[in-house]
Image: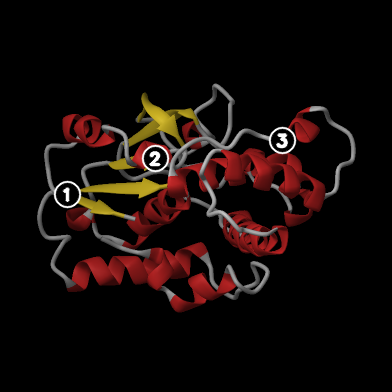
Amino acid sequence: MVDLEQVPEYFQAALDGGRSDLTVSGVASRAADALRSRGLLSRPWTLVGWSFGGVVGHALTSFLSSAELPRQIVLLDSIAPVPEYTRGNDEIGPDLVIPWFCMYLAAKRGGAVPVPRELAAGGDVDVDTLLQAVLEAALEHGALRPGTTLPGLRKVYDTYLDGLRRNNRLAEDFAPARARVPLTLLRPERGLLATPDPLGWEQLSDDLSVERTPGDHYSMLREPVTAKLAALAAVPAGHL
């Protein structure tokens, strides 16, 4: 298992407004070295990458010899690092982030956190007003502990937003190569994006398949995705 949060600079960037000197290639190279040092590249294997881990997994194959390549990469609701699916950090606003944040909160403690009606109604609504609505809904549905305050939730939101900005900046600065192995994209019922397109991965691969799974971007990790993965790859799996 390659835990990206164990890369100190990657973890710290989520606490520093998303700023970092890291690159996708730099993180991928470290991951490749970690897998190689543990002897995990000398036998048949499949690489599984969730969310931004799919981007790092794709980049990782550039640092492998032909004999070390996985049989395939399985992407769990991962967005390809191509221009159509990247945007400047100044374009990452509440209309995009608040629905994802609601999914995140719901997944942390279970239950559901509906998107604020104020956001669905459109117009210019400040973040604290939206977060107040999120706070009330999350408390009502048991997704936050009683006594959670708006300032406390705002700190969690800001860290979450900085993590998104970190990943977006890394993807924006990355020029991906063509895929060297087959790709399988698993899309949950409620993913990050509603587009019917395969999240940009068709631009990087001529051997791409798409499968549907239950859940949302976060809860899909607790759904019976394992059975689907086992059907896709009957070999040991590496995870990002």
Which of the 4 image quarters holds residue 34?
bottom left
Label 1 CA crowd tier, 10 Å (few <14, some 14–19, many 20+)? many
Give above or below for 107 relative to 1: above
Position of 111 compared to 220: left or right? right
Of the numbered discs in the image, which one, if any, rests on residue 76?
2
Which of the 4 image quarters holds residue 209?
top left
Kind of residue sitting beneath label 2: Leu
Q: Residue at x 69, y 60 (%)?
A: 154
Name the spot of residue 151 as percent of width and height, x first: 72, 63
Name the spot of residue 143 as percent of width and height, x first: 52, 45
Q: Which badge, 2 or 3, is on the more N-terminal residue?
A: 2
Q: Secondary structure at mark 3?
A: loop
Label 2 CA crowd tier, 10 Å (few <14, some 14–19, many 20+)? many
Q: Which badge, 1 or 3, is on the more N-terminal residue?
A: 1
Give above or below for 219 relative to 210: below
Check disc 3 and report the residue beneath it.
116
Of the 4 image quadrants, the one containing the C terminus is bottom left
| CA separation in Å, label 2 and label 3 | 27 Å
Kind of residue sitting beneath label 1: Trp
Q: Secondary structure at mark 2?
A: strand
Q: Residue at x 51, y 43 (%)?
A: 142
| CA separation in Å, label 1 and label 2 | 17 Å
Of the 4 image quadrants, the one containing the N terminus is bottom left
Check disc 1 and report the residue beneath it.
45
User: Which-is-in-front pick, marks 1 and 2?
Assistant: 2
Kind of residue sitting beneath label 3: Pro
Give above or below for 80 relative to 214: below
Front one among 197 and 64: 197
